[in-house]
Image (cartoon, grey):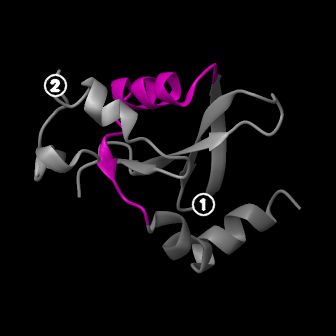
Amino acid sequence: MSICKHLKGFEREKPNDRFLNNECVANLNEGLTLLNRKRSNWAVLLRDASAPGKYRYQLFDETGFKEHYTFETLELAFLDAVAKGYWERDMGALDRLFKSEVWVHGVSFFD
């Protein structure tokens, strides 16, 4: 499902100006999870816990969390994630991966 309701079926294409219009950005929410099919990983938009008042997108794959990028606004975090190839909405990704043996093994490596 695409992020913007008027772009149904969009995930098969590269983003364009219609995708990045004001209506689309205005409908952003924390927790939005975006898939990058070429890299087989995801970005989730969040408030940045280590930088109050800022936002981040946190990258993760099937083995756990990876790096994150911090921005002044949720919109800037979103636009950067899209520019890096994260544009297919996948809201159930974390729930699916948390339950996998690969995820559990990957995150236990850092305990």
Q: Residue at x 15, y 27 (%)?
A: 18
Residue 108: where, in percent of width, then height? 79, 67
- How many dots with numbers? 2
Residue 83: where, in percent of width, then height? 35, 23
Q: Amino acid at mark 1?
A: Thr
Q: Residue at x 62, y 43 (%)?
A: 46
Q: Quadrant of residue 111?
A: bottom right
Q: Residue at x 83, y 56 (%)?
A: 110
Q: Of helix, strand and loop, which one carries label 2?
A: loop
Whether residue 47 is in magenta: the answer is no
Tell me: residue 101, above or below residue 60. below
In whole angstroms, how far apart are the C-alphas of marks 1 and 2? 31 Å
Which residue carries the number 1 mark? 63
Q: Residue at x 81, y 30 (%)?
A: 52
Which residue carries the number 2 mark? 16
Q: Which residues are magenta?
A: 71-91
The residue nearer to you, when weighing 19 against 37, is: 19
